[in-house]
Image (spheres, rainbow, N blue to C red):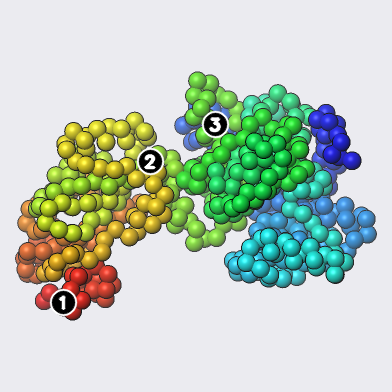
Amino acid sequence: MIESLDTNELRHHFLQQILLAPVYQAAVETPLQRMPKLSHRLKHQVFLKREDQQPIYSFKLRGAFNKLYQLRQQGHHGVICASAGNHAQGVAYSAAKLDMHAVVVMPVTTAEIKVMAVRDMGAEVILHGVNFDSASDHALQLAQTRQLHYVPPFDDEAVIAGQGTVAKEMLAQQPNLDVVFVPVGGGGLLAGMAAYIKSIQPHIKVVGVEPADAASLSAALAAHYPMRLSQVGLFADGTAVKQVGKLPYKIASALCDEVITVSSDEICAAIKDIFDDARAIAEPAGALALAGLKKFSRTHEQQQNLRLATVLSGANLNFDRLRYIVERSEIGELREALLAVTITEEVGSFRRFSELLEGRVITEFNYRYADDSQAHIFVGIKLTGGDSELIDVKHTLATAGYPFVDLSQDELAKQHLRHMVGGRPQQVLQERLYQVTFPEHPRALSDFLSALGDHANISLFHYRNHGAAYGDVLVGFTDASEQALNQLLHELGYPFIDVTKQPSYQFFLGSSAKHVAAPN
């Protein structure tokens, strides 16, 4: 029936369902929080809908409960779904509230913390397959054999209506919005919110935001039907959907004003913005819409003080992903540049290169001796002026005669190379290796290199600024005795440790001659 409705009928149909959805028997009304720091930076009023404050830390509870409530009213007592994330927790939590039996099929690759969270809510968990598609197929088979009702994650009227209550709260909390940004995976949240917003305040612009490597809605709009992507990126796993739902596509194509795609680096930068303003840690899909808001603001710089709202859709983040997010957020915000620079292989060349950067903070400095002519260094530079400052840095290097390559947008460099720079020298070196600790400040690395002066030849160097009070350098020296090096480092006044005999150095960084012993 719904496939035959025109745009006005669609809005009216879902407006009624959203207003009647009994989601508050399980969900809570979440705040719409102003982001003062980001608002000041973007010169717009930015508001964040805190769906991370739901009992399951995600908006998914709304749609799941609305669907299960309707099934319970129809006499159903058992449900099944396939999910490795927030939909699973929404179904499990809702089933417990409604005294229903829930079965959740999860891929065997699902993190144990997510499996335990669903089990703790009382659901029966079945691990099957290595990906969502195989888990979903198995769930559909079990739905028939065990007479359970399958609960789809997004392509369902009741689910869409439940998600639409996010917009109902948002407009009650801030009715004078100009643009609302909504994350898109399967499209259920976008469909529900767009239907409500365009029914109540049709002048408000609704923008969907997708990961660039999982843009199923963009592909569907271009093809004029919900086409299936061959593969999707998994960084924003909550929105890593190969095919947008048929019903969400119908609604979004009629009511959504624009779709923006963003990179993983831009998502990481948005996660940092949320932490800076709200002291909340969003999952990648949870910060997706804010990344789109920021991209939108850059293309609308001629306008100021627009009222922009977005949804922090979830905060179910594996803790071990934070390291990657921190690493990429600086590049995503144009606060760090990565460069490969060629310098002469001679004493003092590091110091001269560092002085050329005129006090800019060096976030990373990797080097390994290769031969006697040239040295290739991998360097990270902190930027405070974005693109314009990077242009200045490049001009400075070119003027000074340093060949370089900008690796800031090189995925291989960001993902792997920065952790792999090094290796064995091509000739036997009498080398000593030290770890040196020094207080962190904007000129810390330059001061360290200046203090070393030209007293020793550096053959290996690794430094990474981690934002802590103290920095740590791994540095190798040649052409100097142990006694002379120890005296030099003592005079610098920094704590140091001789790590020349450590196995990790001998295996991976030491001389290329396999049986050369460490120097005495």
The spot of residue 6 in percent (x, y) is 83, 31
The spot of residue 419 in percent (x, y) is 35, 59
Residue highlighted by disc 3: 296
The spot of residue 285 in percent (x, y) is 59, 49
Q: CA distance from mark 1 to mark 3?
A: 58 Å
Of the image marks 1 and 3, the number of the one nearer the N terminus: 3
Residue 172, above or below 347: above
Does dot 1 land on a helix, a strand or a loop? loop
Structural crowding at the residue carrying mark 3, measured as other residues with C-alpha within 10 Å and reported as few (<14), some (14–19) or many (≥20): some
Point out the image quarter for the C terminus.
Answer: bottom left
Q: Is residue 307 visible?
A: yes
User: With 196 as the anchor, is 292 left or right in this view?
Assistant: left
Mark 2 against mark 1, which lies toward the viewer? 1
User: With 279 as the anchor, is 248 left or right in this view?
Assistant: right
**Toward which corner of the image does residue 333 lie, by quadrant?**
top left
Residue at 76 percent of width and 37 percent of height: 251
